[in-house]
Image: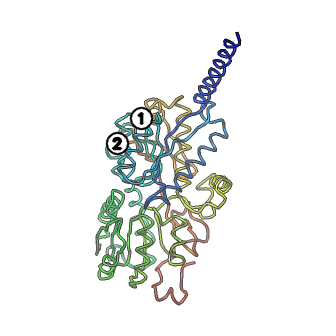
Amino acid sequence: MKKNIKRISVMVTLLTLFSFSVVEATETVKIGNLFPVTGNAARVGIDCREGTEIARLVQNDKGGLWGKKIVYVKGDAVDPKIAMAEAERLITKEGVDIIIGTAASSRSYAATQVAERYKKIYWETSANSDTITARGLKYLFRTNAEASYYSKYAGMIIIDTVCPKLGIKPEKLRIAIVAEDTVYGTNALDGAKKICKKLGLKNVVYIGTFDPNAVDLSSLIMKLKAANPDLLLLSAHLSQEVLFWRQAKDLDFNVKAYLCPTGEGATTAEYVKSLGDDVNGHMVVSYCPPPQAVNPDYAVGIKEFAERYKKEYGHKLTSVYPLITYTGTMVLWDILQKAGSTDPDAVRKAALSIDIPKTVAGFGVKFNPDTGQNVKAKCVVIQWQGGEMWTTWPSEAAVKGHKLQLPLPTWEEREKGKTIK
């Protein structure tokens, strides 16, 4: 009799544990989260992941999705090959229907192919290469702007502001276009060439690429020095941007204006930590910077986001990337509420039905049904002034008292204390 009672007790315990595990499983919504958090794109990848994490916490504070808490199953997109393997693991081993990513275009290009093969949603919030969405993938959606849009903004500010500030006619402006030899870099370079041709910026004196893993860029810089451009357009990740400017200073390579046409590491705290006052005057086509540096009427809600960010991470917001991935992820939650589940076809249908007039990043969301690209995505132009990022263009996003300042001081002038404040 005692043995039977003991057996029954064990069975009841096992059934209870099983019941709890089933309840726990049904009370959560698993979403893949794939960013590079180690390797040469880690700084931007970590910033991006932080934005998606704030979005998860905010949504869970509201009750999650359909009364269930959102949990992330994370992967590390160290390089394109590993990004593919991680996407496959998230889908086949972890059972996710949706992956949020990716920060780096080469990783996104690779991982999105895996998601498409398995007919799972890939929700791109930050990688910007045109080739990502040019393939017409059915289950891919991108909320941020594509690289060609960055190039469009770069061209507009060159014509509208840079040339007048320098006193040089557009057709006379000497331009150098340089990019790292990656999917992201070559797309940025092609976009810059096309926009220069379209806008009559025909005096392009140098075009070139470089190895993204290079530890010495002196030969490139000497070629640029010989070409003597007025304006440099450089597209690279953080480590290469820092390396370039350190060696440019050592080799006394000067330009009247520098514009990073595709964001990347030039909008991170590490950029100014690495280069100090040498960043002052650098221009970047990117997204809304921290709240004090953008018109709050343009980016409604950015102050509240920054406060939540500081609460969670213990320091103030210093990068543009958390905001842009937060924006894209919050849009995903709205779409999932509408879809009623994570079923990829239901999510796709809901995504194609939305038309959001404005988000916290200052732009709206409406997806092209053929590409999955958000056709309402926009950028702003930032200039580093006094060691801080400030929105200087367009006028509706700019902060009063912070206009674009040019030309850049030479290295000799900087040594004597001249800078852009």
On screen, residue 202 above or below 416: above
Residue in view at x 46 percent, y 77 percent: 165
Q: Nearer the viewer, mark 2 or mark 1?
A: 1
In contact (CB < 8 Å): disc 2 and disc 1:
no
| Element assignment for label 1 | helix
On screen, residue 49 above or below 413: above
Residue in view at x 47 percent, y 46 percent: 75
* Residue type of the residue flagged with mark 2: Gln
Any mark on residue 162, and which?
Answer: none
Give residue 361's position: percent from left, percent from top. Answer: 55, 53
Q: From the viewer's perspective, is 159 left or right of 56?
A: left
Alpha-carbon span between mark 2 and mark 1: 14 Å
Disc nearer the start of the sequence (2/1): 1
* Residue type of the residue flagged with mark 1: Thr
The N terminus sits in image quarter: top right
Colour mode of the rendering: rainbow
Q: Please tell me in which quadrant of the rendered image residue 150 appears.
A: bottom left
Which residue is the site of mark 2?
Answer: 113
Q: Please tell me in which quadrant of the rendered image residue 417 appears.
A: bottom right
> Could you classify mark 2 by the number of other residues whose Cα lies within 10 Å: few (under 14), some (14-19), or many (20 or more)?
many
Any mark on residue 92, and which?
Answer: 1
